[in-house]
Image: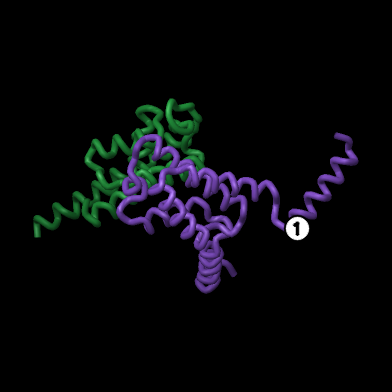
Amino acid sequence: MGKQLTEMLKGTLEGIVLAILLGRPAYGYEITAWLRDQGFADIAEGTIYALLVRIEQRGLVDVEKVPSEKGPPRKVYSLNATGRAYLDEFWANWSFLADRLHHLREGEHQS
Amino acid sequence: MTAETGEQKGRLQRYLEVLVGPLDQKKRYREFKARTERLPPGYRTAIEALQRYMLYFGPGKADSLLEMLDDLADLFEQSVASGTPVRAVVGDDPVAFAEEFLRNYPEGQWISRERARLTDAINQAAGDRP
């Protein structure tokens, strides 16, 4: 991924992760694996983990520790009501931004 | 245990804490070190390098610092278990990762104090806070 895409992703990654968690609860590695499958190849596992710690601190997710067959217990994150409201706000902002940028680009073609 | 010996122990413990720092914090730190020592060599080198950086720039309060180190150890243990290579854990830019991670533990960071000071100074200069 290019540097520009990485920078753009930085501002939207939180919304992306919340949107993934709206579908179903997941633990850190599952989220990174899903992102990799979707072509976000360069996102570090640690970056996702730091983001999960942050959204937990801010009360957007509920966390359950689930024992795992190998290794330490996994923290499974699920979106709670606060998180869902925050995700709605993210999509509203995203629509606004996408719409404005679309207009900007159309205008560029006309001139 | 009677209340008296409990109190004596409390007093002794407080005395030791003044001398050597709170015992439970020392214990937590030793547990963290033991966890890093159980990691495979590459992961251990990486966590020690991150720890060095984070102790330098990280929270000044012991509780916040220990919470940060515990979270870091959780990440590395989980990564070993899932077979995620060191590069995929930390990414192409280890400094960016470390900074991202540190953002979660602002308490007692000297940079947090300076940020608050700058914000207050500008608020005053702009007349937002007379």
In the picture, measured across the screen, residue A88 lies left or right of residue B71, that is: left
Three-letter residue code for mark 1? Val
List the residue tagged with mark 1.
B18
Would residue B2 be found to the left or right of residue A56 on screen? Answer: right
- Scheme by which the image is coloured: by chain
Residue at 83% across, 50% down: B11
Relative to A45, does residue A6 appear above or below in the rendering?
below
Percent across and percent down for residue A29 are 36, 36
Q: Position of residue A92 (x, y in %)?
A: 34, 42
Furthest-bottom residue in this view: B125
For the C terminus of chain B, the quadrant is bottom right
Residue A41 horizontal side relative to residue B14, left or right: left
Q: Residue at x 68, y 46 (%)?
A: B24
Left or right side of B125 for B97? left
| The chain in green | A
Q: Quadrant of residue B16?
A: bottom right
What residue is rendered at 48% in x and 31% in y? A73
B79 to B102, vertically: above or below? above
Colour that chain B carries in the picture: purple
Which chain's residue wears label 1? B
How would you rate the neighbour count of disc 1 (Cα within 10 Å): few for under 14, some for 14-19, many for 20 or more?
A: few
- Residue A88 horizontal/vertical position (percent): 38, 37
Can see residue A15?
yes
Residue A104 percent location from the top left of the image: 19, 55
Front-most of residues B9 and A64: B9
Is residue A81 visible to the viewer in this orientation of the structure? no
Q: Name which residue lies at 54% across and 71% down.
A: B121
Tell me: residue B127, above or below residue B55: below
Residue at the far left: name it. A110
